[in-house]
Image (cartoon, rainbow, N blue to C red):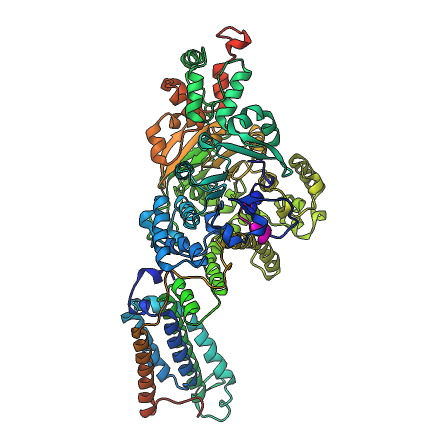
């Protein structure tokens, strides 16, 4: 996420709320697609957009997706075993006594590619959006209460601090001679041992930040001003239109070729 | 000033209205700031009169970049964007961070963060600046930069500065008034700094409050019969007063001839307990960063008291972690009693050399004080209750509880102890395992004089019983008073290794390392004392010993 600030491509300059809207629209569109090919094409489009418009290297986009490879295997297994069309459909081949059917593979592939596409969309969004700009835009365009928005941002700022704390607590307790007991039996005592110092630290830090915010008049007045105001420019609207158009073209083309199937059919 | 838990921080919250408006509690009496009655004035109005800077910069930032942080308060007040831009530049300029506008807060050094925190407060235009131990997490150079800045603000006649601080020697010469609270939150004394320190010195000491070293020195000299004129504060004044004291300079010169450097006893020639040879270490998650340590060679002789010092980020904590098995050192570089520690695993190392973390709470593993000690003897007993301890182990925990003065708090939760008690408990929980050496990370950070004194007494006791101590610290006073050898790191490399006096005698090294000479050493330098006797004359005790009894006592010179 730290890369977001350093790169400044086209996607980085867009209004975060507009970008969020595009992500939501593409996501919505994905939920209605019921074939693996159309989402796969959309996936490629997003990947290219990330590369060309966002300046993200392909590998940096693909690498974080490896977790979804595991999810893909889980989806595949679940479909092979439990897809409701397994009884009626023809077997393509048998794996031992397990019947592998076309609909099972189709459903698994669809779900998996859709999932990858969702994941990549979120990833490109996160990697091209500065958190500060997102928060401001949520306040300015979507009229989120600024108290909530800034609270979220302070929480975000604290995440790496908690991570450091967690590592320190782990090391500190290892020094006490606490062997890293890995068994399930020790899970409870270990969790408790880590949690209490972490929570104590977190509560104290949160309290201090809250005081520091109050000390600088945060929340004292119903309205506050902003040094930098997020606006929706013409280029944002152009991006929105282009994105919708592109997705529509891809989906319609697939439909025309007979590839695309829709969940609502 | 005041001992830990005396209500200093609470008082600062009263000054800008967080008490009673935000923090709830019983509130009576009147506080007024700049003519406004705090109890009747909303916080956002008070915020423009009184600005607060806290100890930990990370726990007071509300945004991600420098400019947003400085703008934060002004935006809350509803100022126009154009005015805010100008105010950001002015505020950053006044703290010497003009080029830092777009920088990310998490990439700044501790000293820079504290200056941004100050700028963020200054931008709101307060007349009163309240700082709660702003230098606690800073190294000596960053501390002195911050103090120089504050001194400038205090002198521009627009700002009143209220500061809670332990490092008195660097601030005392521009402090006009001192207010001391006692352990129960009552006013002990207040008034002119000279009067408080010289007339109430005994009361301050009894309350466990830090005093400037220069004041301790002058008081000590007077007790020994030297006639030091006036009530000097700060290094320059004290040096001048001492130089004017009849016979003192002569005595020091004489002693320098006969003494020849009074460093600690040189450690024995036998094999060191722990040796580090040509150690280079790079964190595996920071491959593109420069190495945290480069070719560090050092050794910890048995029974030594070693200090590890250096600017923030010089690699002190990394070295400490590698010496104690918290981090796994590469093969062939760290040796415990001559054997490579990677042969027996880091666990064997940490059972011989303990690491005391900066925050004692991180090391607590149990709900009770006695459980903390029991855990070290037998983790099972700590999980299932003290009845799983053997009689001998139970006896041992009792002894330690007694020694810590925590017998009646044995069943209390360790998180409820005072800061000093927590620290001593975390040390005891390591010592009870019979470790032969301890590495302490900033052992006296944020503690008052009596707590720090008890902590160091505990370490002296441990050494007397044959233990070896290494401490990582920024506190040069601590180094000169306790350590018999000093290792100075700079950018991950060893800059100096040897007796502390040898390091402080070389101003160019001290300057380059980002550290500072202790106040007494600076007094000697100001007195134009020859280099020979600035060796070893770094602490009040050493100075007093060298000076001996003054003429007022009627003992002839040479009576050492």
Q: Main secondary structure of the magenta part?
A: helix
Looking at this view, name the residue that lies furthest to the left: A52
B302 to the left or right of B65? right
Is A94 drawn above or below residue A196 in the view shown?
Answer: below
> Which residue is rendered at x = 45% and y = 80% of the image?
A76
Residue B174 is a magenta residue: no
Is B352 drawn above or below residue B242 in the view shown?
Answer: below
Tell me the quarter of the picture where residue B78 sits.
bottom left
Q: Position of residue B392 (x, y in %)?
A: 69, 39
Tell me the quarter of the picture where residue B153 sits.
top left
Is B256 drawn above or below residue B383 in the view shown?
Answer: above
Is B11 drawn above or below residue B306 in the view shown?
Answer: below
Residue B20 is a magenta residue: yes
> Which residue is rendered at x = 72% and y = 48% of the image?
B387
Task: Report the quarter where the N terminus of chain B lies.
Answer: top right
> Which of the pair B418/B297 is nearer the observer?
B418
> Which residue is rendered at x = 35% and y = 27% of the image?
B506
Q: Position of residue A261 (x, y in %)?
A: 39, 89
Q: Which residues are magenta?
A: B15-22
Tell me the quarter of the picture where residue B11 sits.
top right
Q: Is residue A177 visible to us here?
A: no
């Amino acid at each position: 996420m730290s890369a977001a600030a350093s790169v400044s491509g086209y996607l980085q300059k867009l209004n975060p709320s507009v970008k969020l809207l595009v992500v939501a629209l593409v996501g919505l569109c994905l939920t209605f697609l019921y074939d693996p090919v159309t989402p796969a094409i959309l996936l490629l489009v997003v990947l290219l957009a990330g590369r060309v418009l966002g300046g993200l290297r392909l590998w940096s986009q693909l690498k974080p997706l490896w977790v979804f490879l595991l999810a893909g295997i889980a989806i595949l297994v679940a479909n092979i075993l439990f897809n409701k069309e397994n009884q009626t459909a023809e077997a393509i081949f048998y794996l031992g006594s397990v019947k592998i059917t076309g609909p099972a593979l189709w459903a698994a592939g669809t779900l998996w590619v859709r999932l990858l596409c969702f994941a990549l969309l979120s990833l490109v969004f996160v990697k091209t959006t500065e958190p500060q700009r997102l928060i401001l835009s949520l306040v300015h365009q979507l009229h989120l209460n600024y108290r909530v928005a800034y609270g979220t941002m302070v929480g975000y700022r604290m995440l790496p601090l908690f991570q450091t704390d967690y590592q320190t607590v782990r090391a500190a307790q290892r020094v006490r001679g606490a062997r890293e007991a890995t068994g399930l039996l020790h899970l409870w005592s270990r969790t408790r041992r880590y949690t209490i110092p972490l929570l104590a630290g977190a509560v104290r830090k949160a309290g201090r930040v809250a005081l520091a915010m109050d000390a600088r008049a945060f929340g004292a007045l119903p309205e506050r001003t902003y040094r930098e105001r997020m606006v929706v420019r013409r280029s944002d609207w152009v991006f929105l239109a282009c994105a919708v158009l592109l997705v529509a073209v891809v989906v319609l083309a697939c439909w025309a070729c007979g590839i695309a199937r829709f969940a609502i059919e | 000033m005041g001992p830990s838990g005396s209500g200093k921080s609470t008082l600062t919250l009263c000054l800008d209205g967080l008490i009673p408006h935000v923090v709830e509690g019983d509130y009576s009496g009147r506080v007024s700031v700049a003519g406004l009655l705090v109890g009747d004035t909303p916080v956002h109005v008070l915020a423009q009169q009184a600005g607060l800077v806290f100890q930990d910069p990370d726990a007071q930032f509300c945004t991600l970049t420098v400019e947003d942080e400085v703008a934060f308060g002004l935006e809350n007040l509803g100022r126009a964007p154009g005015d805010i831009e100008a105010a950001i530049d002015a505020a950053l300029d006044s703290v010497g961070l003009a080029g830092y506008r777009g920088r990310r807060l998490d990439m700044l050094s501790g000293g820079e963060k504290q200056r941004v925190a100050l700028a963020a407060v200054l931008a709101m235009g307060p007349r009163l600046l309240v700082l709660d131990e702003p230098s606690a997490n800073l190294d000596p150079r960053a501390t002195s930069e911050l103090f120089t800045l504050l001194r400038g603000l205090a002198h521009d006649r627009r700002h009143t500065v209220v500061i809670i601080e332990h490092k008195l020697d660097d601030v005392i010469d521009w402090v006009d008034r001192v207010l001391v609270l006692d352990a129960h939150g009552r006013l002990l004394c207040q008034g002119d700094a000279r009067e408080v320190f010289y007339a109430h010195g005994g009361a301050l000491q009894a309350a466990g409050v830090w005093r400037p070293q220069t004041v301790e020195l002058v008081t000590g000299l007077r007790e020994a019969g030297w006639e030091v004129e006036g009530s000097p504060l700060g290094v320059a004044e004290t040096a001048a007063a001492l130089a004017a004291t009849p016979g003192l300079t002569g005595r020091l010169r004489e002693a320098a001839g006969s003494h020849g450097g009074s460093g600690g006893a040189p450690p024995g020639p036998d094999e060191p307990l722990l040796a580090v040879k040509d150690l280079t270490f790079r964190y595996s998650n920071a491959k593109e960063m420069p190495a945290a340590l480069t070719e560090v060679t050092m050794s910890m002789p048995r029974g030594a008291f070693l200090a590890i010092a250096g600017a923030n980020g010089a690699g002190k904590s990394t070295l400490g972690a590698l010496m104690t098995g918290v981090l796994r050192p590469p093969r062939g570089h760290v040796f415990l009693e001559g054997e490579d520690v990677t042969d027996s695993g880091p666990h064997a190392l940490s059972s011989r050399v303990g690491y005391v973390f900066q925050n004692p709470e991180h090391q607590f593993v149990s709900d009770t004080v006695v459980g903390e000690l029991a855990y070290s003897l037998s983790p099972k007993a700590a999980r299932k209750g003290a009845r799983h301890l053997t009689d001998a182990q139970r006896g041992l925990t009792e002894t330690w509880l007694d020694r810590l003065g925590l017998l009646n708090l044995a069943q209390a939760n360790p998180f409820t102890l005072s800061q000093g008690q927590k620290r001593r408990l975390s040390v005891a929980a390591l010592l009870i395992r019979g470790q032969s050496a301890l590495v302490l990370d900033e052992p006296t950070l944020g503690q008052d004089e009596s707590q720090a004194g008890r902590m160091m007494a505990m370490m002296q006791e441990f050494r007397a019983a044959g233990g070896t101590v290494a401490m990582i610290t920024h506190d040069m006073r601590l180094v000169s008073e306790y350590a018999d050898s000093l290792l100075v790191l700079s950018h991950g490399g060893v800059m100096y290794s040897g007796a502390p006096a040898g390091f402080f005698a070389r101003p160019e090294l001290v300057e380059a390392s980002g550290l500072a000479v202790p106040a007494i050493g600076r007094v000697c330098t100001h007195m134009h004392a020859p280099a020979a006797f600035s060796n070893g004359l770094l602490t009040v005790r050493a100075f007093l010993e060298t000076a001996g009894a003054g003429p007022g006592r009627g003992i002839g010179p040479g009576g050492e």
